[in-house]
């Protein structure tokens, strides 16, 4: 895989998300959280993780909005701009997006992007699910509960929660285990 330009990912995220200050605050924290758990992934995947953290929510940006399903819109924007397929797939599937896609009717479109189950996927989930919408770091369980409250009853997020929540919490646990394992090996 060719080298991922993390600085270019940051600049793109900043350009796309700056009109959305809270989303930009969240994204900066996600990137910092990804950096804090980067040792949970193989060294050759760390730039990919950092770039995915910067770009995971670009689908919220006015320049990206098409379907209003931000993982799909973000992946499509990244793809149009020439980002590598693995990165666009991580954007498309970040934080269990497939569960929400099934509940909201976007699963077929999302299937255009491979859904990898990897240490990078887990670390991206960890970073996203420990960064609140205002950019504050918080425990994943609390972040998930607040997001479900924010989206409200009957939302695709609520309909997907029974499957998505355990998926997210398991990924966070795997990141903790990988970090502990690497620390013990050091």
Image (cartoon, helix red, strand yellow):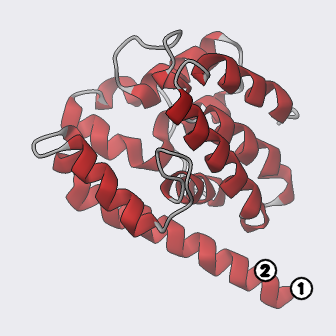
Determine whether, in the image, residue 15 is placed left or right of residue 114: right
Per the image, label 2 sits on a secondary structure element best described as helix
Mark 2 surroundings: few (<14), some (14-19) or many (≥20) residues within 10 A: few
Q: Residue at x 58, y 23 (%)?
A: 17
Q: Residue at x 50, y 13 (%)?
A: 64
Q: Residue at x 26, y 45 (%)?
A: 150
Q: Residue furthest left?
A: 154
In the depicted structure, whether residue 183 falls above or below residue 114: below
Q: Residue furthest bottom?
A: 184
Determine whether, in the image, residue 181 is placed left or right of residue 68: right
**Residue 186, numbered circle:** 1
64 and 164: which one is in front?
64
Q: Where in the figure is residue 81, as x and y percent of width and height?
A: 68, 12
114 and 102: which one is in front?
102
Q: Are marks 2 and 1 in contact (CB under 8 Å)?
A: yes
Q: Which residue is mark 2?
A: 182
């Amino acid at each position: 895989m060719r080298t991922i330009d993390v600085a270019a990912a940051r600049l793109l995220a900043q350009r796309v998300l700056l009109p959305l200050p809270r989303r930009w605050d969240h994204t900066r924290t996600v990137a910092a959280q990804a950096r804090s758990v980067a040792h949970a992934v193989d060294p050759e995947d760390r730039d990919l993780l950092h770039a995915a953290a910067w770009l995971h929510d670009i689908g919220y940006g006015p320049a990206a909005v098409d379907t209003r399903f931000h993982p799909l819109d973000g992946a499509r924007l990244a793809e149009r701009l020439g980002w590598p397929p693995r990165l666009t797939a991580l954007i498309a599937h970040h934080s269990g997006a497939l569960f929400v896609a099934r509940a909201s009717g976007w699963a077929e479109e999302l299937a255009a992007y491979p859904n990898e189950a990897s240490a990078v996927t887990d670390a991206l989930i960890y970073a996203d699910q420990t960064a609140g919408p205002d950019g504050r770091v918080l425990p994943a369980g609390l972040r998930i509960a607040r997001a479900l409250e924010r989206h409200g009853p009957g939302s695709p997020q609520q309909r997907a929660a029974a499957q998505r929540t355990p998926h997210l919490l398991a990924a966070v646990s795997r990141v903790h285990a990988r970090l502990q394992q690497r620390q013990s090996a050091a």
